[in-house]
């Protein structure tokens, strides 16, 4: 086994290329004796001279020409390896591990589709869960990025808002309050409210809202998906506070109605969140930029 270093090969290549120790030294920002020393060490480990001096000129020996052939091949292999690693770090082949709040899933998958169209080689792992679980996963450093409502202080997270998330009161289209203007919040105390599971960001935001207004609507049902809530509201089982993002199709189709309650919508925002100590991959960084570039126009 030859004992040589990549540095020796690099110096050798420069000398072989220029057929001059001084020009090689200039190219590599080394002194000429340093260049001669590296070549000498290489010659010692091979056991043959690589260059010979005739007058003022140097020439490659037969061993030198062989070495030149292999050193170029080795350098080429290293460049190729570098390109592979760059691609891995880059956008062409990366993996993206994200999780979004159940409520954010109504627009996040569409945004993800746009992103994947632009980066078809990226493999995306998407988890859809509620706010409490998202915070737990961030704690465990299990993800690159999370899309959720504003995270609480003290978790050492970076959170940037990129889109509005208005919460509205929905009812069945034939409910008595449909079309009534400026319904006082207190009026909702007479209605049954269908709410999300504990741990949902939508639920805690609406609880805070009602607390601030000193109103306590009766909880009719607790459900752990927005879909189930929409079905229940449509069936006339009660009212619900949901993100406007979750009901656009039903509103268009006239299957649900938004009530005009005073101080609604509750103004929330969607945030793209990651741990402060997370070194984001090129793909994760690109997806974050992509989300931030969406602005607030997509509500
Ligand atoms: P969620 O939404 O209700 O689906 O947890 C997250 C949030 O609003 O923070």
Image (cartoon, rainbow, N blue to C red):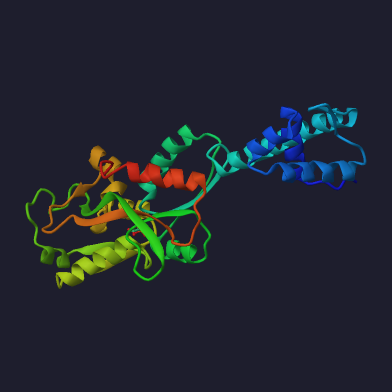
Q: Which residue occupies 68% across, 33% down?
A: 23
Is residue 157 visible from the viewing direction of this image?
yes
Location of residue 224 in the rendering, given as x and y in whole percent from the top left corner: 39, 60
Q: Which residue occupies 89% across, 27% down?
A: 62
Location of residue 259 in the rendering, given as x and y in whole percent from the top left corner: 16, 52
Task: Look at the picture and state if 173 lies above or below 206.
Answer: above
Considering the image in quadrants, where does the C terminus appear?
A: top left
Location of residue 280 in the rendering, given as x and y in whole percent from the top left corner: 49, 52
How many dots with numbers?
0
Q: Nearer the viewer, residue 71 or 193?
A: 71
Determine which quarter of the picture holds residue 191: bottom left
Q: Is residue 284 left or right of residue 192?
A: right
Q: Which residue occupies 54% across, 40% down?
A: 122
Q: Nearer the viewer, residue 16 or 237?
A: 16
Determine which quarter of the picture holds residue 263: bottom left
Q: Is residue 145 left or right of residue 165?
A: right
Is residue 216 visible from the viewing direction of this image?
no
């Amino acid at each position: 086994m030859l004992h040589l270093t990549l540095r020796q090969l690099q110096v050798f290549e420069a000398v072989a290329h220029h057929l001059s120790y001084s020009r090689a030294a200039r190219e590599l920002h080394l002194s000429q004796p340093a260049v001669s020393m590296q070549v000498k060490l290489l010659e010692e480990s091979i056991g043959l001279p690589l260059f010979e001096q005739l007058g003022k000129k140097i020439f490659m020996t037969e061993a030198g020409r062989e070495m030149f052939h292999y050193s170029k091949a080795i350098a080429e292999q290293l460049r190729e390896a570098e390109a592979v690693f760059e691609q891995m770090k880059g956008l062409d082949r990366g993996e993206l591990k994200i999780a979004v709040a159940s409520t954010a899933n109504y627009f996040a998958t569409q945004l993800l589709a746009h992103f994947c169209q632009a980066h078809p080689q990226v493999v995306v792992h998407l988890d859809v869960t509620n706010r409490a679980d998202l915070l737990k996963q961030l704690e465990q450093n299990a993800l690159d990025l999370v899309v959720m409502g504003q995270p609480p202080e003290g978790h050492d997270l970076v959170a940037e808002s990129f889109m509005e998330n208005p919460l509205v009161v929905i009812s069945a289209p034939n409910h008595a309050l449909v079309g009534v203007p400026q319904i006082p919040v207190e009026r909702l105390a007479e209605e049954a409210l269908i709410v999300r599971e504990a741990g949902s960001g939508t639920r805690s935001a609406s609880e805070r809202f009602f607390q601030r207004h000193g109103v306590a609507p009766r909880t009719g049902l607790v459900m752990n998906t927005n879909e189930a809530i929409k079905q229940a509201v449509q069936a006339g089982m009660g009212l619900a506070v949901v993100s406007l993002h979750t009901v656009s199709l039903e509103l268009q189709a006239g299957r649900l109605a938004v009530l005009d309650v005073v101080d609604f919508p509750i103004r929330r925002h969607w945030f793209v969140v990651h741990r402060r100590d997370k070194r984001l991959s090129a793909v994760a960084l690109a997806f974050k930029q992509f989300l931030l570039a969406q602005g607030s126009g997509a509500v």
